[in-house]
Amino acid sequence: MVDATTERTNHGKADETEPEVALRGDELHKTYGSQLPFTRTVDVLEGATIEVRSSEIVGIVGANGSGKSTLMKILVGALEADAGTVETGGRVGWCPQEGLLYDRLTIRETFRLFGAAYEMTDEEIVAARDRLAAKLDFERFLDYRIDHLSGGNRQKVNLGVALMHDPDVLLLDEPYTGFDWDTYLAFWDLTEDLVERGTAIAVISHLINERERFDRIYELRDGRLHPDEVA
């Protein structure tokens, strides 16, 4: 991991030394078969390769059904590729498009559950929860059950539990869906803080409007990732 005290430019990248590769997926292949007769298989990934370095924000765009979420699941280890390799450095945080939250738990209980899974102490869990609740503005909902939250607040909690263990690599699948404008801005403030500390971030979205926020952008089409220059 690049030393966070090194002088940085452009999204926190080091001036003189090339940041370390924090995440690499190489020649990833994935085909979905069908159990129904006379129906074809679907080749989703056909040699997709991606690299994300420390203190870097990388965007991944593509049409609906292009395989973006499949790629993300393979990178985080939630889905096995048919071929290819994935290498990550350090702790990984994952914010999926469909949150992995339990409806009957409160936000406090949710953070305790995920914190225990991350092997955090009680003090670390409370500190992370309170810091992220203040940053993402869901403090007043801590005793609400997940199924009583709005879609936007559920996504805030989804993002919070992905961040609570201070990951070295953060993978985000449509992370700001349902956010209001203030939360959207808070999200980007948070990402800037993370890259200053050396976190590598990959963001999947069907549409990227503010291209200047990204160091690099890939388009996923025809099963492969095609680099696109940031405007």
Image (cartoon, rainbow, N blue to C red):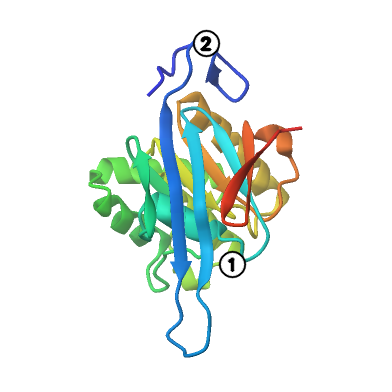
Question: x%, y% of residue 222?
Answer: 62, 57
Depth order, front residue of 176/147 = 176
Question: x%, y% of residue 204?
Answer: 58, 50
Picture quarter containing residue 114? Answer: bottom left
Q: Secondary structure at mark 1?
A: loop
Depth order, front residue of 6/187 = 6
Which residue position is annotated with label 1? 150
Depth order, front residue of 171/99 = 171
**Above-or-below relation of 93 to 221:** above
Callout count: 2
Q: Amino acid at mark 2?
A: Glu
Which comes before the other along the chain, label 1 or label 2? 2
Picture quarter with the N terminus? top left
Q: Amino acid at mark 1?
A: Ser
Left or right of 165: which side holds 10? right
Tell me what residue is drawn at x 39 percent, y 51 percent: 76
Which residue position is annotated with label 2? 7
Q: Secondary structure at mark 2?
A: loop
Measure the C-alpha gap from mark 1 to mark 2.
Answer: 41 Å
Crowdedness of circle 1 by 10 Å Cα count: few (<14), some, many (20+)?
Answer: few
Question: x%, y% of residue 73?
Answer: 43, 57
Tell me what residue is drawn at x 53 percent, y 79 percent: 40
Picture quarter containing residue 107? Answer: bottom left
Can you see residue 165? no
